[in-house]
Amino acid sequence: MKAKLLDGRAVADSIRIGLGPAVAAVRAARGTPPLLAIVTAASNSDRSSQSYQQAKVKACAQAGLMARCHSAGPEAREIIELLGRLGADPSVDGIMVEQPLPAALDPVRIFSAVAPAKDVEGVNPSNYGRFFLAKNAAEIAACGAFPPCTVAAIIVLLGESGIAACGREAVVVGRSEIVGRPAAHYLCALDATVTLCHSRTADLPGHVRRADIVVACAGRAGLVRGEWIKPGAVVIDAGMNRVGGAWAGDVEFAAAAERAAWITPVPGGVGPVTTAVVLANTVQAAQRVISKGNLEKA
Ligand code: NAP
């Protein structure tokens, strides 16, 4: 393998360790650590959802945060009411909703019920809009909304490669509202020249072959062939596909790693960093409440 590994587990560990002083400061200021509420819709309460939840609870504990798991009933009304209660609860700093949502639930309606200030995944349409209105990295940082968390993780991993996006050709494979589109927007804000590919794209190989940065988020195991990768490219694979009982990405890893300069593994790439970003956002949300309270007192 020629490529260097963008090791998401190591990056996530260093994000968690870096949160230590801020977590301690929150605890010192109000007596309790930052708290993340993890919400699962009832029909998603299967074993895999429970294991995702447990992984997040464990990550919170490792970083010194508290986590509370909530399960809502099957009706939209029930999850919306639960999100409303969590939004009004001053002990809750961050709220995340396990995805994908059951097909019967309208994501716009559900995500609109996540309190914007506690929206640590960047799913509330008002936050999503603020993020999309930001034209560059400085405006994204100042827009008051957390960017969609998987996309923030992709950008963290790109930063780890040391390869700046400015002026590079970036190809994003997948145009979902939670990963592909916001990833394309963020890369554009970083001054990359971005091509957004999808299932109707003619000549996907031709686009990928031009890319200095490839972000794969189609949810199709092995869709991006190793031989398409431009030598020296950075390859970030957000795909999580179950193949024969194991996880596989969207990129043909072994062949791509022979050509790329940097590549993420699956598992152990984007996934752990996404969780670490949610934790970091929860800590920041708690700090914002404390600073606001201090300002009001002054
Ligand atoms: P999604 O909503 O199903 O969107 C998939 C996108 O891929 C669509 O835009 C689709 O195009 C495109 N696509 C499908 N087949 C294609 C093909 N043959 N060629 C080119 N494009 C194709 O999926 P998602 O929610 O974005 O998730 C994508 C993947 O990321 C999944 O494996 C998911 O598990 C993973 N994921 C990982 C994380 C993480 O934290 N690691 C977080 C979220 C998602 P159309 O628009 O034309 O249908």
Image (tube, rainbow, N blue to C red):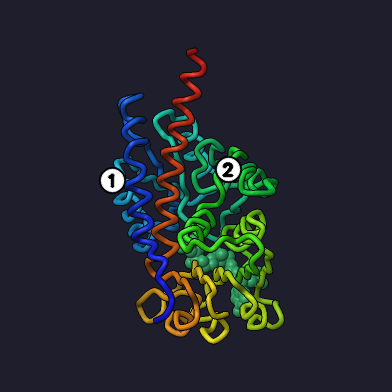
What amino acid is at disc 2?
Ala
What amino acid is at disc 1?
Ala
Residues packed near mark 2 inside 10 Å, few (<14), some (14 to 19) or many (20 plus): few
Q: Nearer the viewer, residue 112 or 43?
A: 112
> Which residue is labeled 1 in the image?
61
**Residue drawn at (65%, 76%) of the image:** 199
Residue 78 seen in this snapshot: no
Q: Secondary structure at mark 1?
A: helix
Q: CA distance from mark 2 to mark 1?
A: 27 Å
Residue 207 screen position, x and y as percent: 66, 78
Q: Residue furthest top?
A: 298
Q: Nearer the viewer, residue 52 or 145?
A: 145
Residue 60 screen position, x and y as percent: 33, 46
Query: Circles 2 and 1: CB distance less than 8 Å?
Result: no
The answer to whether residue 148 is left or right of residue 240 is right
- Earlier in the chain: of badge 2 and badge 1, it is 1
Mark whose residue sits in front, 2 or 1: 2
Q: Is mark 1 within 8 Å of ligand 1?
A: no
The disc at residue 153 is none
**Residue drawn at (37%, 37%) of the image:** 35
The answer to whether residue 280 is left or right of residue 213 is left
The answer to whether residue 238 is left or right of residue 52 is right
Residues packed near mark 1 inside 10 Å, few (<14), some (14 to 19) or many (20 plus): few
Residue 30 screen position, x and y as percent: 35, 24
Residue 15 screen position, x and y as percent: 38, 50
Q: Secondary structure at mark 2?
A: helix
> Which residue is labeled 2 in the image?
141
